[in-house]
Image: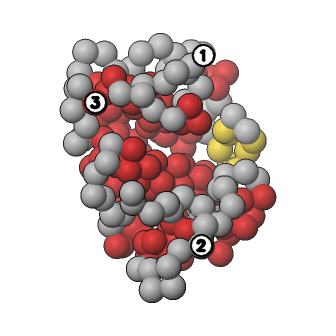
């Protein structure tokens, strides 16, 4: 299932970025659009990613928000946020690596979808957040080439549909000689030139 490969690649990319964040950087401000928390910090964004990772095994089992009954409310990061995130990431990765039925219906907060579509949705979130967080912190970062290729293959044909649902902003024009990653970032509306 190509969506499994996409998830594992995107999840690994996000973890590689999160694992570089220092404790001091966690208190830096983050864009308001990245969190439902007022005046979010990078730690708030990490907390949202931790909850998202924690949910993966239960979603794949077919559980609903009501079934979980507040299991993932509160602070999942504790005193060592990066280590806590990594533990949740390990569990999510193992769950996605199991033998999954791509057509099994799972229950999300915004509707019911087959597993393959769920994996597409959360992979988009992970992949472009990896790039965005690195960019926010001023790092010289590129999405791994295999992930870029898989995003083009799985997400590329659906970009306009996702854009119509509000997932992606308008397309951004990139230089005509741009590499494959920059073309992808422009296509999904994320690319901005370095200052």
Q: Residue at image x 51%, y 85%?
A: 176
Question: Label 1's element?
Answer: loop
Q: CA distance from mark 1 to mark 3?
A: 32 Å
Mark with earlier residue (1, 3): 3
Q: Nearer the viewer, mark 1 or mark 3?
A: 3
Q: Which residue is mark 3?
A: 25
**In the image, farthest residue toward the bottom:** 177
Q: Residues within 10 Å of mark 1 (few under 14, many from 20)?
A: few
In the picture, measured across the screen, residue 140 lies left or right of residue 183, that is left
Q: Residues within 10 Å of mark 2 (few under 14, many from 20)?
A: some
Q: Residue at image x 31%, y 48%?
A: 138
Is the residue 33 above or below the residue 112 in the image? Answer: above
Q: CA distance from mark 2 to mark 1?
A: 45 Å
Q: Which residue is mark 2?
A: 173
Is the residue 139 above or below the residue 188 in the image? Answer: above
**In the image, farthest residue toward the front:** 195
Q: Residue at image x 56%, y 31%?
A: 32
* Residue 178 can be seen in this image: yes
Q: Position of residue 195 (x, y in %)?
A: 39, 57
* Residue 152 can be seen in this image: no
184 or 122, which lies in front?
184
Q: CA distance from mark 2 to mark 3?
A: 31 Å
Q: Which residue is mark 1?
A: 69
41 or 16, which lies in front?
41
Q: Mark 1–mark 3 contact, CB under 8 Å?
A: no
Q: Position of residue 189 (x, y in %)?
A: 60, 61
Question: Label 2's element?
Answer: loop
Mark with earlier residue (2, 3): 3
Q: Which of the labelled discs sits on residue 35, or is there none?
A: none
Question: Label 3's element?
Answer: helix
Mark with earlier residue (2, 1): 1
Q: Residues within 10 Å of mark 3 (few under 14, many from 20)?
A: few
């Amino acid at each position: 299932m190509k969506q499994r490969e996409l998830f594992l690649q995107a999840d690994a990319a996000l973890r590689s970025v999160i694992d570089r964040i220092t404790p001091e950087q966690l208190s830096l401000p983050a864009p308001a659009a990245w969190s439902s928390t007022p005046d979010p910090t990078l730690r708030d964004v990490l907390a949202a990613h931790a909850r998202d990772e924690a949910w993966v095994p239960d979603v794949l089992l077919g559980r609903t928000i009501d079934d979980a009954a507040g299991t993932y409310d509160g602070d999942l990061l504790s005193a060592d946020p990066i280590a806590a995130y990594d533990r949740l990431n390990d569990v999510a990765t193992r769950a996605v690596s199991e033998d999954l039925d791509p057509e099994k219906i799972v229950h999300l907060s915004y509707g019911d979808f087959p597993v393959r579509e769920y994996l597409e949705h959360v992979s988009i979130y992970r992949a472009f957040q990896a790039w965005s967080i690195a960019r926010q912190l001023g790092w010289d970062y590129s999405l791994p080439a295999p992930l870029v290729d898989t995003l083009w293959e799985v997400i590329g044909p659906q970009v306009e549909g996702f854009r119509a649902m509000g997932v992606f902003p308008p397309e951004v024009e990139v230089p005509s000689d741009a590499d494959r990653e920059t073309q992808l970032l422009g296509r999904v509306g994320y690319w901005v030139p370095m200052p």
